[in-house]
Every structure is written in structure tokens, then in C-alpha cells.
Amino acid sequence: MIDTTRLDRLFQSMGQRGAEEFVMDRVEDISERLADIEWRYRQGSLTELAREAQIVSRLSSEIGLISLARVVRDLGISADRGDMIAFRAVWQRLVRIGDRSLAQVWEVPGLSL
């Protein structure tokens, strides 16, 4: 789910070009950090994964990717608590939602990324 109101505010405050660059930078950063989260998951580095998840949640929220922000936040919380049952369930949600959320940004009307 995309919070289009948040995107509208970005475009109003930064202008078309500035907002597009801001969103593009965030999408690239989120993509890279999600790959890093996957690597940390495979390495079993849950403490670092939890910190990275907090950053991805914040970045996602900044550009209105509300669903992604919530799922990544939940992933970080479950990793921080060491709750592997919850972690695995949230991981599956992240796999489903991650790519879809980033792809939705490209489909926002008026956004020429």
C-alpha cells in the first residue's frame, strides 16, 4: 500500500524533479538494504539485521511505502527478540511484499522515475 498523500507532500515541498530524485534515491537504498537484510538472515546475524530493518522501515515510510515499512519493522522486532517463529512468518510476508511495494512506486501517476 502506498500513502499517496505522503508522496503528494513530497512533490509539493520539493518540486517534481527534487521529489523524483528523492524517491529514486530511497528506492535504490531500500533495494540495497533489503539485499543486505537477506544476506544477514542467511548468515544468522539477527542483531545487525534488526538495525538494518529499522532503517529500511524509516526509508520506506518516508516515501509512503506503508505496508513495506510495517513488515520490515515487524521483522526487526522479531529478530531483536530472537523470536524465530515470528521471524520466519514475517520473513515470508516480506518476501511477498518487498518487490511488490517497490514496483508500485513506479506505477504512481505523475512519477516519471
Image (cartoon, rainbow, N blue to C red):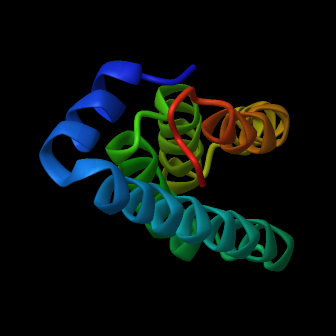
Residue 15: x and y, percent? 23, 50
Q: Which quadrant is home to the C terminus? A: bottom right
Q: Which corner quadrant of the image does residue 98 belong to?
A: top right
Q: Is residue 24 left or right of residue 11?
A: right
Residue 102: x and y, percent? 68, 44
Question: Residue at 81% of width from left, 79% of height from top?
Answer: 43
Question: Residue at 77% of width from left, 30% of height from top?
Answer: 93
> From the viewer's perspective, is residue 70 above or below residue 103?
above
Residue 110: x and y, percent? 50, 33
Question: Residue at 75% of width from left, 70% of height from top?
Answer: 35
Q: Is residue 61 left or right of residue 113?
A: left
Question: Residue at 43% of width from left, 55% of height from top?
Answer: 20
> From the viewer's perspective, is residue 32 above or below residue 70?
below
Q: Is residue 6 left or right of residue 31?
A: left
Near-viewer residue (77 or 35) = 35
Residue 3: x and y, percent? 41, 22
